[in-house]
Amino acid sequence: MKLEVIATCIDDALVAEENGADRLELITAVTEGGLTPGIGLVRQVVKSVGIPVHVMVRPHSRSFVYSALDLETMRAEVEAIAAAGAAGIVVGAVTEEGLVDEQALEALLPLAEGMQVTFHRAFDELEDQLVGLQTLSQYPQITRILTSGGLKPAPAAIPQIRALVKASEGTSLCILAGNGLTPETVCSFIEQTGVPEVHFGSAVRYGRSGLAPIDPVQLRTLADSLVRYI
């Protein structure tokens, strides 16, 4: 079982590592669902922690449908993130028809050679997630899908997430479940879905607010509760 924790600043990154996170998702603009952080922060976090740092590549929060100019921005960001030594990127793009945007992937993935790639919650806006998973499985560089099983919180989509876990067997993909998970309910969720990785943001922060610092006690308690699944 892997525990991924959102970090929005260097303090988040250090507290997360010290209290049991296996991996960081580094973002800014948490209230907008996460955008690409500044390259200075990326460099600082990468050199300050020992766990993998996966960096969001998302130029705006309007939608996950990107123009040619958006993609040029994203290409520049991927190049800079790779040069900073990050372990991975978190990216996603869909077409206006609700399909995985393969042209976007083919523009971005070559620049992320040697890095892990997570397809983020743009996946939850696809017309058919199982078809989308089949499409993503054709790109071995993509190692995981961050999903809540649709537009609702993950605990409301247990059958769908279980189906995605089953469909991912034998592929390069693993399912990283996020959105709506809590330390109190995550173990039951894992047992019902079989997910190999979970993603936490506000639920391990003071007051369960996305804008608050990480609560080290909450995070350590969560990390300790997941040891049984190793």
Image: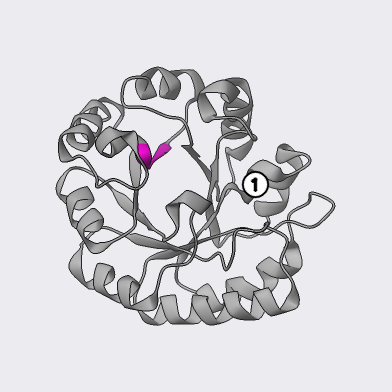
Mark 1 is surrounded, within 10 Å at the Cα level, by few (under 14), some (14 to 19) or many (20 or more) other residues, namely: many
Q: Quadrant of the N terminus?
A: top left
Q: Is residue 166 left or right of residue 229?
A: right
Is residue 201 found inside the magenta-colored segment of the image? Answer: yes
Can you name the residue that lies furthest to the right here?
97
Q: Amino acid at mark 1?
A: Phe
Q: Residue shown at 33%/34% (left/top)? A: 208
Closest to the observer: 67 or 2?
67
Q: Find numbered disc 1 in the image and state the secondary structure of the residue it sits on.
A: helix
In this picture, residue 155 sits left or right of residue 96: left
**Closer to the camera in the image, 51 or 124:** 124
Instruction: Please say whether residue 159 is one of the residues in the magenta stretch.
Output: no
Where is residue 168 shown, x and y percent of the image? Answer: 59, 39
Query: Split into 4 quadrants, where in the image is the C terminus?
Result: top left
| Residue 67 at x, y percent in the picture | 74, 72
**In this rendering, position of residue 64 left or right of residue 217:** right
Please say if 21 is above or below 79: above
Look at the image and give the residue range highlighted in magenta. Answer: 197-202
Q: Magenta residues: mostly which secondary structure?
A: strand
**Viewer-side residue, 147 vs 106:** 147
Q: Residue 78: x percent and y percent?
A: 51, 75
Residue underneath mark 1: 123
Residue shown at the point (39%, 74%) measured from the top left: 38
The x, y position of residue 198, in whole percent, is: 41, 37
Task: Classify residue 6 as left or right of residue 44.
Answer: right
